[in-house]
Image (cartoon, rainbow, N blue to C red):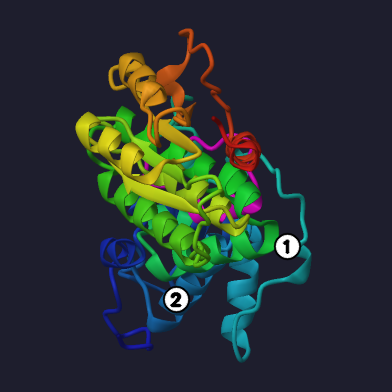
Amino acid sequence: MDETTGGTGMTTGELARRLGVSPTTLRSWDRRYGVGPAVRADGRHRRWTSRDVAVLEAMCRLTSAGVPPAEAARAAKEGAAGAGTAVPAAVLTADERTPAAEWMPADERTSASGERSRAAGALPLGDARQECRGLARAAVRLDAPALDGRLTSAVERYGLTVAWEEVMMPTLHAVGRRWASSGDRYVEVEHLLSWHVSTALRRVTPLCRAGLSDTAPGPVVLACVPGEQHTLPLEALNAGLAQQGLPTRMFGAAVPAEALTAAVRRLGPAAVFLWAQVRSTASFSLARHVAATQWGVKGARRQPMVVLGGPGWAGRSAQGMPRPPSLREALSVLTLTHGCGRA
């Protein structure tokens, strides 16, 4: 692109596609934060020079890190005038529970009629950590490097449990709600975010290399019930158990009942954790069958403790089967179960 006023530059539509935002958002940023084009052909049509693009790319990088748009725009313009763009220290230490409405551009919050806009980026996060908001922005822009960096930073700063419960999960739920309410418009956002969350969880999952003695409790078996494909909560639990030194066997999505029963008999687990995301997949008959599965020599038979996870199990009786409502509580229940064993 030509930097001179006589050059053609980039149109607003072309720049919007490059940045992964809507043209309306670019016009809003121009009005609100003064990051508009230096050139307007014929006095009307916007033409963005390479310097304009550099400012907006820097602004997008900062907002993906959780910096409010006004601060990001100011830092990006200052950086363009100097050697580079830096994140203001005051921004990074600000209150991490600012309402999400404060970081959405006006066109992505409320339309002229007062109704909630459906523009890309307006994820329903409510009150959220700064890291959660930055993660949402990166996901909507399909910015894989930013997603990876944000997730790694959250785990390193807060630890696995807090990162899962207060950063990863709220963002996943927000994307899922927007996908459900807007057809398939956000399917690519949900898939990319899920893949990077899974990658981050596996990256922090140590392998338990120590062998089990004959008298030690067996591993914790982690499995989704038949028909259930949501594995991310199991991956988070697997990582947490491994960090505590507990042996696990992760079987993942939609494990057939016969295969699950066979694995329980072969492994002799201390506990079996069954995940069901929706009511239609939560089978209490399967859970009871697994809980009744035995192994060992006659006179010294053993059975696993069955622990139920996920909203699919809610609202129904599950006598003798704990249903921890969070990752933190699931880790507590399974750690205690593994330490005590069950004869």
Does dot 1 land on a helix, a strand or a loop?
helix
**Magenta residues, dominant SS class:** loop
Residue at the spot of label 2: 52
Which residue occupies 48% across, 13% down?
318
User: Which is more toward the observer, 151 or 223?
Assistant: 223
Which residue is outermost to the front? 299
Whole-percent x, y for residue 119 in the image: 37, 41
Label 2 sits on what residue type? Asp
Residue 133 in magenta stretch = yes
Which residue occupies 66% across, 73% down?
87
User: Which is more toward the observer, 302 or 41?
Assistant: 302
Which residue occupies 58% across, 74% down?
76
Whole-percent x, y for residue 267 in the image: 38, 45
Q: Give, as a single range, the part of the protein colored magenta.
A: 118-136
Q: Quadrant of residue 221?
A: top left
The numbered dot on residue 91 is 1
User: Which is more toward the observer, 11 or 174?
Assistant: 174
Does dot 2 land on a helix, a strand or a loop?
helix
Check if mark 2's residue and mark 1's residue have beta carbons within 8 Å. no
Q: Relative to 204, say whether 110 is above or below.
A: above
